[in-house]
Image: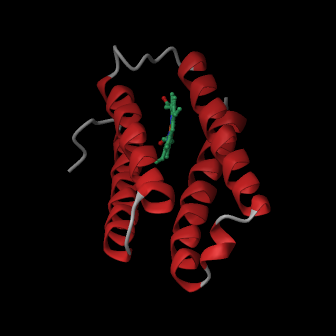
Amino acid sequence: METVILIHVSAVLLSILFFFGRGVMMFRNPSFVSRRGVKRVAESVDTVLFISGVALAWLTQQLPWHDAWLGTKLLLLLLYILLGMVAFHWGRGRVVKTVSWMAAVAVYIIMLLIALTKNPWPF
Ligand code: HEM
């Protein structure tokens, strides 16, 4: 259980570091973002994040429809993925890309606070 939490939290930190770095590189060197290696590493980290999260939910017997903090975290995860798609793929123009990238980072920080407090409204 401790090991799974350690894996999960490491993936949480790596994932946002990667996301943040991809955003910075998008403006400095756009071809870097679409490089296959970069995508592969980012996707692998997110897969570990997802699998360890599901494993933790199973191990601690917490379900998103019973435990509001988990349900809220997962809904925000969808929003985060959507904003990431706009920032890196669908968005046209620098302003749209920058605003969605920054909004995604803000959503991620809220997810972090929700997870650490186990409270769907952590403010
Ligand atoms: C599929 C997605 C995810 C699922 C199903 C999930 C589920 C869980 C579960 C069940 C726990 C264990 C809580 C406990 O110890 O009782 C946990 C811990 C945690 N999660 Fe996630 N998680 C997911 C994604 C994320 C994301 C995207 C973040 C960051 C933004 C995150 C941040 C954390 C943190 C920091 C903890 C440790 C909390 C603590 O022990 O104090 N998780 N997660």
Q: Is residue 76 left or right of residue 42?
A: left
Please tell me in which quadrant of the rendered image residue 70 appears.
top left
The residue positioned 50% from the left and 61% from the top of the image is 88
39 in relation to 93, above or below: above
Please state the horizontal and vertical placement of residue 101, each as a whole percent of the image: 40, 64
Q: Is residue 110 left or right of residue 1?
A: left
Furthest-front residue in this view: 92
Mark count? 0
Q: Quadrant of the N terminus?
A: top right
Please state the horizontal and vertical placement of residue 69, each as a whole percent of the image: 33, 31
Does any portion of residue 51 appear in the rendered image? Answer: yes
109 in relation to 62, above or below: below
68 in relation to 18, above or below: above
Please state the horizontal and vertical placement of residue 42, each as a whole percent of the image: 67, 54
Furthest-bottom residue in this view: 28
79 in relation to 41, above or below: above
- 6 vs 53, nearest the viewer: 53
Please tell me in which quadrant of the rendered image residue 58 appears.
top right
Does any portion of residue 84 appear in the rendered image? Answer: no
Give the colouring mode of the picture.
Answer: secondary structure
- 120 vs 80, nearest the viewer: 80
The residue positioned 20% from the left and 51% from the top of the image is 123
The residue positioned 41% from the left and 37% from the top of the image is 78
Please state the horizontal and vertical placement of residue 25, each as a whole percent of the image: 58, 77
The residue positioned 32% from the left and 67% from the top of the image is 96
- 92 vs 72, nearest the viewer: 92
